[in-house]
Structure formats: C-alpha cells, structure tokens
Image (spheres, rainbow, N blue to C red):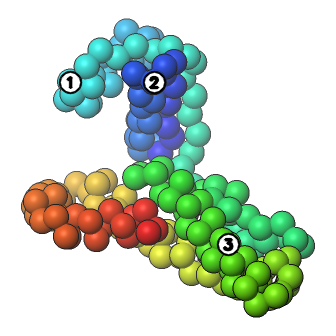
C-alpha cells in the first residue's frame, strides 16, 4: 500500500515510513496533523516517544520495479536505479552495497589481469551477478513482507517465536544480518 513519510530535521530524530493497505491509505493521508499523530502513535503502540510532523506528508504505491538488464551501453545500474523493492529492512540500500561490491571485485580482477575495466565481458558479468542477487533479494523481501502482513495467528506466532530465537542465538542473528546486508 501507499506510504506516509515524515522526514525529520536533525540527527536526533528519525523519519517514519507508514505502510498501509490501499483501502486505508487515503483515509490516513487525509487526517489532520493532530489525528495523524494520534493514529500513528496508537499504531506504533506509543513506542516512538514524541512525534511531530515537520514537513508535508506524501504517499506513493509500493510496487516492484526491476530493470530488464542492469546496464545500458557503458553505464551500470546500481541499487534503486536497478530495482525498486518494498522498503522493509532497507533492502534497496543493501542491493546498492551488493552491486558496488560486485563491481569492485570485477574491476579488481580486470586490473590484475590487465584487462580493460570497461570491457563488455565485465559489463555482462556485472549484469549476471547483480541479476542473481536481485532475484534473491526480491524473493527474501517478498517472504519477509508476507510474514509481517499476515492475518494468520499461527503464522504470526511462528514468526514471533522465530524472530525471538534468531535474536537470542548470536551466530544465527549474525547469519541473517549478513544475508540481509549482502555481506
């Protein structure tokens, strides 16, 4: 569904992204400031502390956008330029990091081999590797989003128990953090 975003002005404040189903988004977006803050505070179970609107709210639909290829001539697409995914867990940023890491590795190999870093083989290798990582991230993001949007009590309980276990087992937590961050 669409988003309402509240950019904050300084480093001691955070931006809030409110994701809602399409049928609720218009109503939420049209709330006056006091009611918007009241509903957001209620939705977040009052865990945010003081909330204030410091800019205009805006919304946009959450749709998956993926490039058919991750290059055009000698220009490579990285991160959000290549794919637009659901903002859950900052996966667009993570894809950018993965793309940069792939490119750096390919450039290093080409330089060590005495090859041109702008070669078609490097571009094609980048396209293939980023395409694979993008597909993996899209599937993982879709599963994660589905788990958090479910209305099923059994899935919700299993999700919460699973998250609790992951959070308490250091090596498992590190595994998932590394996987989500592309490292």
Disc with the residue nearer the chain's start (1 vs 2):
2
Disc 3 designates what residue? Answer: 103
How far across and how far down the image is residue 52, in percent? 40, 13
Q: Secondary structure at mark 1?
A: loop
Q: Are marks 3 and 2 in contact (CB under 8 Å)?
A: no
- Give the vertical position of 182 relative to 107 (above or below): above
Residue in the image at 39% along x and 64% along y: 180
Residue in the image at 37% along x and 9% along y: 34
Residue in the image at 56% along x and 61% along y: 97
Between the C-alphas of marks 3 and 2, the distance is: 31 Å
- Give the vertical position of 67 relative to 118 (above or below): above
Disc 2 designates what residue? Answer: 11
How far across and how far down the image is residue 37, in percent? 35, 17
How far across and how far down the image is residue 71, in percent? 79, 71
| Foreground residue among 128 and 33 | 128
How far across and how far down the image is residue 49, in percent? 25, 19
Q: Secondary structure at mark 2?
A: loop
Between the C-alphas of marks 1 and 2, the distance is: 21 Å
| Foreground residue among 138 and 60 | 138
Residue pushed farthest right?
A: 73
The crowd level at tag 3 (other Cα within 10 Å; few <14, some 14-19, many 20+) is: many
Q: Is residue 141 visible?
A: no
Residue in the image at 26% along x and 65% along y: 174
- Give the vertical position of 10 relative to 160 (above or below): above
The crowd level at tag 2 (other Cα within 10 Å; few <14, some 14-19, many 20+) is: few
Q: Secondary structure at mark 3?
A: helix
Disc 1 designates what residue? Answer: 46
């Amino acid at each position: 569904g669409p988003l309402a975003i509240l950019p904050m002005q300084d480093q001691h404040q955070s931006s809030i992204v409110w994701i809602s189903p399409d049928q609720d988004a218009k109503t939420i977006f049209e709330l006056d400031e006091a009611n918007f803050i009241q509903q957001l505070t209620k939705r977040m179970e009052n865990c945010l502390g003081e909330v204030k609107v410091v800019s205009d709210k805006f919304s946009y639909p959450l749709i998956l956008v993926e490039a058919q290829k991750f290059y055009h001539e000698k220009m490579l697409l990285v991160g959000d330029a290549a794919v637009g995914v659901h903002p859950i867990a900052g996966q667009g940023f993570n894809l950018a990091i993965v793309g940069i890491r792939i490119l750096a590795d390919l450039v290093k190999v080409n330089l060590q081999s005495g090859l041109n870093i702008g070669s078609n083989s490097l571009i094609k290798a980048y396209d293939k590797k980023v395409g694979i990582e993008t597909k993996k991230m899209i599937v993982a993001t879709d599963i994660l989003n589905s788990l958090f949007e479910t209305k099923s009590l059994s899935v919700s309980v299993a999700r919460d128990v699973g998250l609790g276990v992951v959070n308490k087992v250091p090596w498992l937590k590190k595994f998932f953090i590394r996987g989500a961050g592309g490292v």
